[in-house]
Amino acid sequence: MPYVDCGVALDALPAHLYPLQDATAAARCAIVPGYCMRDQWGQPDVMRGEETQLLGALAMGHHSGWFVLPGTHSKWVELASGRILQLRTYMTGELFTLLGQHGTLAAAIGNAAPVWTRRRLPMACVPRTGCARPPTFFLPRQGRVR
């Protein structure tokens, strides 16, 4: 099932439904296509299912503005008159789960053995040489590896 381009307004989405051939006449079923938007480098960002939440926002009279759709891969979507202008995916939920089970956060919330011990702490606090600048913020970018 192909994605639709973000040029397709949300209220035009029903024209792009994909009917299921095996559905009975009494229970007609269709798949709602997701949206795909490409950045200036041609890298795709996609929405699969969240567009139905945006349809709900339209039905409630919200046609423009930023919408945050939380989840394992949270979406930030900017709408203008019911059209998607920007789409960004952030792997916040997945990152929280990984850190909550395997990182220093896990010890803080009681999900793992303590990561820092008196023996390890002094080693971790030694400044590293050769570091010209701190790393850039990676949260909006790590989803592009998928």
Image: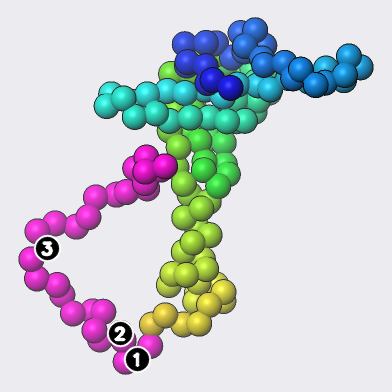
Residue 18 is covered by the magenta coloring:
no
Q: Relative to 96, does residue 62 appear above or below in the rendering?
A: above
Q: Determine the main secondary structure of the stretch shown in magenta.
A: loop
Question: Tag 3: residue type?
Answer: Cys
View extreme (right): residue: 26
Please name the residue that numbered disc 3 is placed on. Answer: 131
CA gap between label 2 and label 3 equals 20 Å
Question: Seen in the image, is 11 located left or right of residue 78?
Answer: right
Label 3, residues with CA under 10 Å away: few <14, some 14-19, many ≥20: few
Quadrant for residue 25, please give it.
top right
Question: Seen in the image, is 94 located left or right of residue 14?
Answer: left
Helix or strand or loop: what does disc 1 sit on? loop
Please name the residue that numbered disc 1 is placed on. Answer: 118
Residue 118 is covered by the magenta coloring:
yes
Residue 76 pos. (x, y %):
48, 33
Please name the residue that numbered disc 2 is placed on. Answer: 121
> Which residue is drawn at the image coordinates 50% and 35% (left, top)?
75
